Image: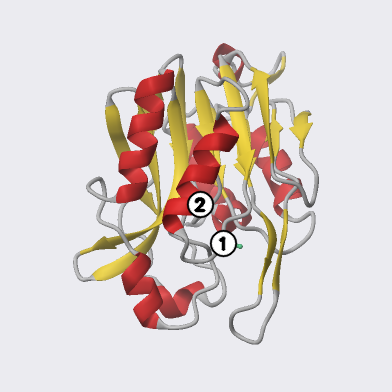
């Protein structure tokens, strides 16, 4: 199957335009599963709680999920992408998985990063894995990369591919951790980061691009530029993520000794 990453540069609060730009970008290539960045349609750097409230959307009945549904239906594909989700009177930093038959699932970011703790409620539902065509896909968001438990949970649930929407600002951090997450769990890891800057609060956030897809042996199949809006698509065989064999005597998941681990 073909897995694609889209590296976007949204303008804060210009949701209609950002959605249109993202759909145009995806139309440059063909994939069975697309991964888009965290908050790809809203922008990331919130300055006031009213902005968070105004840009948050119900899932699945909001404009971002509807736009993704329409794209996935037209192109017979799946997409994993991040958005601020309004639910239960709070806002979550969420990512949806959408397919040709519509909304599949929502994941709410468990490990909030920096100022996100001011604006968002921490995720309140466990990691989950879903069929997406030929692959089983697990979604995690940006800073979740720093916690090996995120990727490990998804691998133990049977994920072949980690869909990882991100808005990364620390150069070459998640690129390294996600390489290890892919290797140690024997899964594909598709990180879609954004580029550009936001300077809305007196602090400038510089997004680092370098979106990447890593194979279960830790090989980077593709890595994008640090500063350009672009896409990449690679052909992957999800079956290669289903054997966890490391040596003739070792299995990446089977050799775990959880009875000796602390949680
Ligand atoms: C991040 O979690 N957006 C760094």
- Residue at the extreme left of the image, as rendered: 88
Q: Are discs 1 and 2 less than 8 Å apart at CB?
A: yes
Residue at horizontal 53 percent and vertical 31 percent from the top: 34
Bin the neighbour count of mark 1 within 10 Å (Cα to Cα): few under 14, some 14-19, many 20 and up: some
Residue at horizontal 38 percent and vertical 21 percent from the top: 74
Side (left or right) of 85 relative to 6 = left
**Image x and y of residue 159, in percent:** 48, 29
**Image x and y of residue 129, in percent:** 39, 33
Disc 2 marks which residue? 18
Q: Residue 137: name its quadrant.
A: top left
Q: Is residue 187 visible?
A: no
Q: Secondary structure at mark 2?
A: helix
11 over 63 or under it: above or below: below
Label 1 vs 2, first from the N-terminus: 1
Mark 2 beta carbon near ligand 1 (under 8 Å): no
**Image x and y of residue 217, in percent:** 73, 25
Q: Is residue 72 visible?
A: yes
Residue at horizontal 42 percent and vertical 53 percent from the top: 16
8 over 242 or under it: above or below: below
Residue in the foreground of this view, choosing between 110 and 12: 12
Q: Secondary structure at mark 1?
A: loop
Disc 1 marks which residue? 11
């Amino acid at each position: 199957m073909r897995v694609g990453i889209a590296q976007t540069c949204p303008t804060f609060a210009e949701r209609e335009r950002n959605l249109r730009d993202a759909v145009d970008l995806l139309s440059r290539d063909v994939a069975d599963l697309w991964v888009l960045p965290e908050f790809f349609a809203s922008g990331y750097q919130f300055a006031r709680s009213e902005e968070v409230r105004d840009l948050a959307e119900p899932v699945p009945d909001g404009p971002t999920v509807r736009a993704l549904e329409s794209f996935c239906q037209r192109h017979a594909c799946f997409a994993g992408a991040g958005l601020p989700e309004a639910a239960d009177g709070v806002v979550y930093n969420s990512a949806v998985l959408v397919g040709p038959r519509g909304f599949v699932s929502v994941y709410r970011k468990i490990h909030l990063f920096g100022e996100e703790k001011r604006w968002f409620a921490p995720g309140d539902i466990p990691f989950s894995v879903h069929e997406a065509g030929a692959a089983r896909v697990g979604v995690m968001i940006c800073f979740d990369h720093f916690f090996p438990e995120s990727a490990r949970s998804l691998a133990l649930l049977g994920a072949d591919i980690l869909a990882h929407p991100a808005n990364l600002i620390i150069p070459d951090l998640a690129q390294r951790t996600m390489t290890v997450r892919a290797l140690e769990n024997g899964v594909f890891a598709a990180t879609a980061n954004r580029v550009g800057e936001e300077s809305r609060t007196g602090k400038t956030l510089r997004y680092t691009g370098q979106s990447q897809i890593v194979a279960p042996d830790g090989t980077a199949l593709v890595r994008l530029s640090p500063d350009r809006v672009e896409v990449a698509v690679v052909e992957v065989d999800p079956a290669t993520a289903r054997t966890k064999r490391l040596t003739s005597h070792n299995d990446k998941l089977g050799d775990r000794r959880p009875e000796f681990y602390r949680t």
